[in-house]
Amino acid sequence: MTDGDTPAREDAEMAEVTTARDENEPMVNDQGAEDEEGDEDDGAPTTAAGGGKKKKKNKKKKKKGGGGGGAEGEGGADAGAAPAESLVWSTEMRGIKPWGPFRSVKGAPTQTFPPSVPVAQLFPSGEFPAGEEQEYKDFNSGNQKETQEELRERERIFNINYHEIRRAAECHRQVRKYVQSIARPGILMTDLCEKLEDMNRRLVQENGLHAGIAFPTGCSLDWVAAHWTPNSGDKTVLEYNSVCKIDFGTHVGGRIIDCAWTVHFNPQFDLLAEAARESTNTGIREAGVDARLCDIGAAVQEVMESYEVEIDGKTYQVKSVRNLNGHSIGPYRIHAGKSVPIVKGGEATRMEEGEVYAIETFGSTGKGYVREDLECSHYMKNFDVGYIPLRLPKAKSLLNTINKNFDTLAFCRRWLDRLGEEKYLLALRNLCDVGIVQPYPPLCDVKGSYVAQYEHTILLRPTCKEVLSRGDDF
């Protein structure tokens, strides 16, 4: 499989790419190319190239730092970290910011590009870069039951539990940095997914159920909001006018990182992607220990639906997809029981210390409501399923394969093909019919609409919330 041509650039030039620029411009590192800067007026309607326009918007705050994968990432590697010696990166995507060099500690290998060194070898001490740290909204209020010193001590005691999930997060950053360099109009979606998954396996050092891919690579297009990945033989191509949601996960020891962004190349989709991105950042800011889930949903909806976009000469108000949610994450369990709504009126359940959440939002130009449609590719064994007798020998054999390779992590049909399973559809249907396996068909808004998504994984630590998956890109 080919990466396509990637223009070469000296390290010194890459260091300069961190200067301010319009995040909606595609990052192209051609020699002599000029970087364009775009100014934005928060208080007045703006018009994007290609006709997109925004009616109103809440004033945005600048984010602090980046993820551990960037040149200046807050909470990243030690001061002695060494950048990769040969870094070549460019992208045709819009809406993402430029990456800095990979980081590693002195005396450890430096990452290549494309990446080839497993993340664990870059940080041999086992101390992996932290994500972006944000204070809780009421951290300094008089309602704190414990002093900051007591909280920091508890943080120190439990810090060892963070290593696995931070390793998974650093792997996710490096994989998506690679994928952003190869995703371009004309690539087969199957090729894109397989390159992403192969890189994920290599960097996380896939090892059975101990480390690997957390769930199938979602690459849902246009009006398909989630849960679509190509089955074997699918010839779908990523196009210039596509709105593609890349949603993939990495896990170490069952500690899952779930993170997604919207791939688009046509500037008329800039504001749709921005609506989802800013709504997700709003959800992250509102999240915290004792935060009510319903309050997060109301804040997200207010930001999302403050956007209007113009696509092909027609104006649409962006709508939050009301039956899609963020969710809590548990060990080997992508949906751990709590849902984080993206519209007002949800449950008043509160977040708790130590919990991990996927904060994700979906903005649509359609009805803002999804339904199951199209051929199914995603499946997952039910977490609490007990013993259920099976009559079909092929179903028993397939269940053994699922238990050995995925257990309660989600999987797709391409992965069964990769393991050498043949003529398994009847057996898979039987496992679904008896309730052992749950199918997750694609979730679609009305045909002809467009849906954008952004997502980050956060950890509610005693002293702060950590945006584990934050990177230089978004």
Image: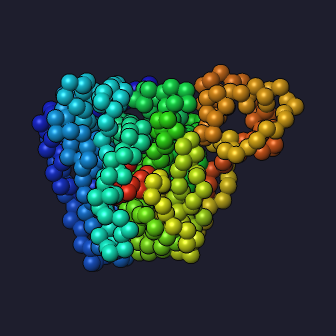
Q: Residue at x 58, y 45 (%)?
A: 333
Report if residue 189 is visible in the image.
no
Horizontal arrangement in the rendering, residue 341 relative to residue 455 (left or right): right
Horizontal arrangement in the rendering, residue 395 relative to residue 309 (left or right): right
Residue farthest to the top, as pictured: 420
Q: Residue 262, how many percent across, how many down? A: 43, 52
Q: Residue 156, how many percent across, how many down? A: 33, 47
Between residue 286 and residue 182, name the one nearer to us. 286
Q: Is residue 55 above or below residue 16?
A: below
* The quarter of the displayed image where residue 208 is located: top right
Q: Residue at x 25, y 24 (%)?
A: 109
Q: Is residue 11 above or below residue 94?
A: above
Horizontal arrangement in the rendering, residue 260 relative to residue 8 (left or right): right
Between residue 39 and residue 280, name the one nearer to us. 280
Q: Residue at x 56, y 30 (%)?
A: 209
Q: Residue 47, how many percent across, how many down? A: 31, 69
Q: What colour scheme does the image use?
A: rainbow
Q: Residue at x 51, y 67 (%)?
A: 350
Report if residue 36 is visible in the image.
yes
**How many numbered discs sit on the rendered protein?**
0
Between residue 249 and residue 367, name the one nearer to us. 249
Horizontal arrangement in the rendering, residue 149 relative to residue 210 (left or right): left
Q: Residue 369, how many percent across, how many down? A: 60, 65
Image quadrant occupied by the N terminus = top left
Residue farthest to the right, as pictured: 391
* The quarter of the displayed image where residue 411 is located: top right
